[in-house]
Amino acid sequence: MQKEEIKYVIERIEHLEKIFDEVKNSFENEPDFFENENMAKKVSLLTQYMDSGQWLRDYSLDEKGELPKELKRGILSEDGLYNLICDIEQGKKRKANPLFKFFKKDEILFAVFWIIIYVLGFGNSDTLSESIGIPKLITVIFGILLSAGILFFTKTNNLSEYFGLCKPQKSAREFLFYIPLVIISSVNLWFGFTSEISPVTAVLSVLSMFLVGFLEEIIFRGMLFNGMAKNGVKTAIIVSSLTFGFGHIVNLLFGAPVFETLLQLVYASAVGFCYTAIFYRGKSIVPCIVSHIFVNSTSVFTLQPSAEIFVISTVIQTVLGIGYGIFILKKKEARA
């Protein structure tokens, strides 16, 4: 190819490279990207470049070594332009989704929406399960459907990392190797176990508790905390922790003893604070989910402790939960 033709190709690539970078940056960082008419024109220009065959011809020239090595050529990477255009198209579809619109409009109200569904759903499911003589059956079915729905929404809208369904960003060393969390999680092992529960009920109860652990973490931490943190992290931590703790007051509606329930509100709030700190620090709710599921699942087989033992365990969990949470948050502030 002649020098004049190569020069023209270089000028085109440089021009489109600038547009490519501008569109990519706007798409990743600007909330009103899809309302920006100027960006829409530039996306159309990039799409035409890719679909017309011109991109392939420029790519072939690059592969043959006819373009300067110092030329910035991100737009010519095999997946760069194609992936960006595909991501933008998927973004358009997400934006048209009513549930995603709801999420983007008000994340806090979106979280409250799921909290209401969760609380009412599990409460009524437990009642229905008892009425048909198979405890937790309807609860498990409802929990699976609700979990599947939230996971589908999360995955299709690329929110897994945002909600914390990912590997922690910090090393275990920075969390004291989660040792305080392990101690908190082992609470039910302190009371001993009972075998006075049928195999079917045991399996369904464990499955139910597994689902509760997952759902409460993604709703209270991934959704509610994230939504509130945009308006103030300290307030978000307090509200997420207390809401998680006081959410257990519904147990009174299902015949739970008043004294035990009140103690549960205290230590659950402390543990909720601990979980929130872990999520805020590591950007992952996975450790919280694992801990929550273990606590819930072992509760199915634990013996009922005496009032004195229950008070002692409440004090230990509360002190550990608040102390561990403060340690994590203070360490973050020191590094900021």
Image (cartoon, helix red, strand yellow):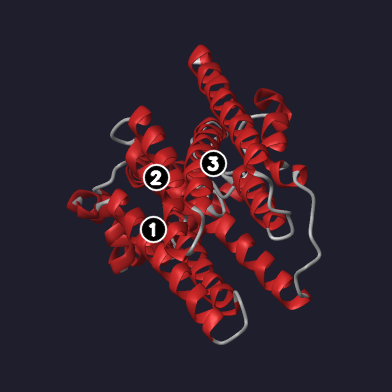
User: What's the amino acid at mark 2?
Assistant: Thr
Position in image of residue 294 (x %, y %): 69, 51
Q: What residue sits 35% from the left and 67% below the top?
A: 93
Question: Toward the viewer: 25 or 261?
Answer: 261
Q: What residue sits 66% from the left and 45% below the top?
A: 291
Task: Give the answer, above or below, for where 112 lies relative to 319.
Answer: below
Where residue 203 sits, quadrant-wise, is: bottom right
Please tell me whether mark 1 sits on a helix, a strand or a loop. Answer: helix
Q: Earlier in the sequence, mark 1 or mark 3?
A: 3
Q: What residue sits 27% from the left and 60% below the top?
A: 102
Circle on res. 67: 3
Relative to 112, 205 lies left or right: right
Circle on res. 243: 2
Position in image of residue 179 (x %, y %): 73, 30
Separation of disc 2 and disc 3 at Cα?
60 Å
Circle on res. 115: 1
Separation of disc 1 and disc 2 at Cα?
10 Å
Please tell me whether mark 2 sits on a helix, a strand or a loop. Answer: helix
Dot 1 and dot 2 residues touching (CB under 8 Å): yes
Answer few, some or many: residues within 10 Å of disc 2's Cα (few below 14, many 20 plus, some between 14 and 19).
some
Where residue 34 sits, quadrant-wise, is: bottom left
Circle on res. 293: none
Instruction: Give the residue furthest to the front.
Output: 307
